Structure formats: C-alpha cells, structure tokens
Amino acid sequence: MTGFLNGIRVLDLGQFLPGPYCAQILRDMGAEVIKLEAPAGDPMRGFGPLGSDGVSLFYKGINAGKTLTTLDLKSEAGKSDFCALVSKADILIESFRPGTLERLGFSPDRLKELNPRLIYCALSGFGQTGPYRGRAGHDINYMALAGGLAASGTAERPVTAAPPVADFASGSQAASAVLAALFGRERSGTGCHLDMSIAESVLAWQGMNLSASKSYSHRPERERNMLNGGYACYQIYRTRDGGFISLGAIEPKFWANFCSALDRREWIVRQDEESPQSSLIADVSGVIATQDLAQWQSLLDPVDCCFHAVTEVEQLAQNPQVQERKMLEEDTEEPGLVHALYPAWIDSAPPLPRPPLRAASCADLIEAWASS
C-alpha cells in the first residue's frame, strides 16, 4: 500500500482530526504529506495525554509519517512560500471555516491559477454554502445536526460515541473523494475543488433511517427498531460480573442457535414480537445476568450465533484476532503512543508501521520540490 501514491504530494492545512486523518490515509498509501501549521501550531498539540516532550500523543498519532513545517499565511513571506508549495502539490486539504483561505488571498480560482492540476479539498463543518456555513462546531454538533444522535442511545436520551464518528467518517470520505479526483485527473488532466462537509458525512449514512422514518413500524426512535436496541436478538446485555456481551442474531438461524445454547428454545418463536421487545429483552437480560462474562464466552464463542463479548479498549491488543491481523503498533520512540494502522492487507502482507512526525524548514521543502 505504501507504494500506491508514490510521487503524490499533499499539503495538509487541517487541524484536530478530520483533515489530518484524511491526509494520514493518503500518507499510509504512499503520498508525501507536508503538514503546514501556523506559528501557534495545531490546537490538537495540547489535547489529550501528553508525550515526553509535552506534545499530545493524539497529535503525534494522527500526524505520524508526515513532515511538519511552520507557515504564516498572514505574512507576505508565508504567502510566497505557500504559492511555491501549491504550484508543485497534487492535493491541498484544509479544514478552516468557509472563506478563511479566500480572505488570505487564496480563493479556489487563485489556487487553480497557481496549479490547474491541484485537487483542493475544503473539509468544513457544514459546507461552503448554506445558512450554517460560518457556524462553529465539533463532532457532537455535526452528529446532532445530521441525525447521528437522534436514533442512538437509550429511550431517555441520545448518547455520544467514541471515537468521534463524524470526524473520522469525514476524514475517510474526504480521502475517498480525493482518490477518485486523482483518478479523474489522469483522464482530464485538470484538478478540482472538493467542497466537503463533516456533518454531511454523517447525513450520507442516513438513508436507512430516513426511509424508516416514513414507516410507523420501523421508526428510528431510540430503543425501538432492530438496529438501535428495540429487539432482543440485536442487543447488548450485562453479565453478572459487570461485563457486557453483544448479540447480533438477526437471521432466524442465529437466533435459534443462541436460544438453543441457553436452553431457552421457547424464545425462538418470539423473535418477531412487536418492538420494542421489552418483555423478551428483560427475559434474556435476566438469564445473562446469572453468569460471569468468561462463562458466557466459554459457552457462546463456539456457537454460530453472532455473539461477541464487549472488549474493553485496554484489552484490544491482547485479542487473538487483533494480534493475528497486526493492526495495532506501539510506537518504539514514544512510550504510551499506540498506532491503529490502515485496515487493509495488500497481497497477503499487513500494513507497515508509521514513521514519526518529522520537522523540516519550508525553504528546504520548496527547494526539494522545485528540483524534482
């Protein structure tokens, strides 16, 4: 995978997670990524657990493999350097509020003048147009607007998800759009301007819920339908020792296997009871609560019923499937930093480790790009 985008140059002006995650995906595929930061630095530097040098482990993780340089776009020297980099870049990713880059003198038209082959991805909260274009926000706000919270959680209230869904979804979808634009550029010879919204990355997943909202029997109300807690066969249950199990026995054969394993075959015919299946959920909950998590794993792991124990985050690295797939890597230079690698094996080989973020001067980068 690290050879797929060899020779492709990316300028990453993003902050926090969405833009930098998009750029990291491209770097994992072999692109050279230059992270451009204002003199004050990315606010992510101080967010979360700090490393040995006082810089956030979250920041180091999401920017691993990139080259960092400082650029003041409010100064004439910084603007000149930016022009030089843009003229040689293939991709520009930014996550400012709409209009910010234009006010600094770099509208989409100006960027196109500098480099007609540039793929310019503007990843903002709500998009470059519309009444919310200038509104500030974070993951929880984008999830709230786009339906990501309305159908998730308990009947009493929505529940936020971790890691932040909108941030990572938008980074992933921006990367796929950029890759498609690169392919299109091979045919047309010209780049494009991608106007992408973090909130719309969640909205794009709402087709099922929007359709369900038109049906009384499948309304996407919390703890009402099949996929959000309304059914016993697709549910999370607490064990006697405070652990949790997940059950995804949607297909009748899986539900029958589960019921048989628990010696409760009388439950099999109840799978399609009207939702919310409060009575059946209570019956299953009562049985699951009689044994510890390890006992349920011993009984149900061998059963073909879409069962899995809820794995605590600190236990992920010990999971035999995770170990076999080699998707997690502890950083050898920074204690406490764990990399979750790009989730793909290529030609039977697992993903390669990411090198650390390194620093370089803007002048050196411009010189290197100009001579190649």
Image (cartoon, rainbow, N blue to C red):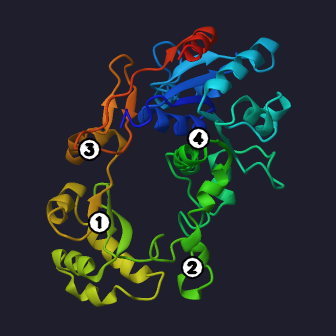
Asked if labels 4 and 1 touch by Cβ distance under 8 angstroms, the answer is no
Residue type at the position of mark 3:
Val
Q: What residue does disc 4 label?
A: 18
Instruction: State which tag comes first along the sequence, 4 or 3.
Output: 4
Instruction: State which tag comes first along the sequence, 2 or 4.
Output: 4
Residue type at the position of mark 4:
Pro
Q: To which quarter of the image does residue 326 belong? A: top left
Coordinates of residue 147 in the picture (x, y in percent): 63, 63
Q: What residue does disc 3 label?
A: 322
Q: To which quarter of the image does residue 301 belong? A: bottom left
- Numbered label attached to residue 289: 1
Asked if labels 4 and 2 touch by Cβ distance under 8 angstroms, the answer is no
Camera-nearest label, 1 or 2? 2
Residue at disc 1, secondary structure: loop
Give the CA separation, mark 4 to mark 3: 25 Å
Residue 348 visible within the image: yes
108 over 169 or under it: above or below? above
Residue type at the position of mark 1:
Ala
Q: Nearer the viewer, residue 291 or 142?
A: 142
Q: What residue does disc 2 label?
A: 212
Give the CA separation, mark 1 to mark 4: 40 Å
Instruction: State which tag comes first along the sequence, 1 or 4.
Output: 4
Residue type at the position of mark 2:
Ala
Question: Residue at left 56%, top 63%?
Answer: 205
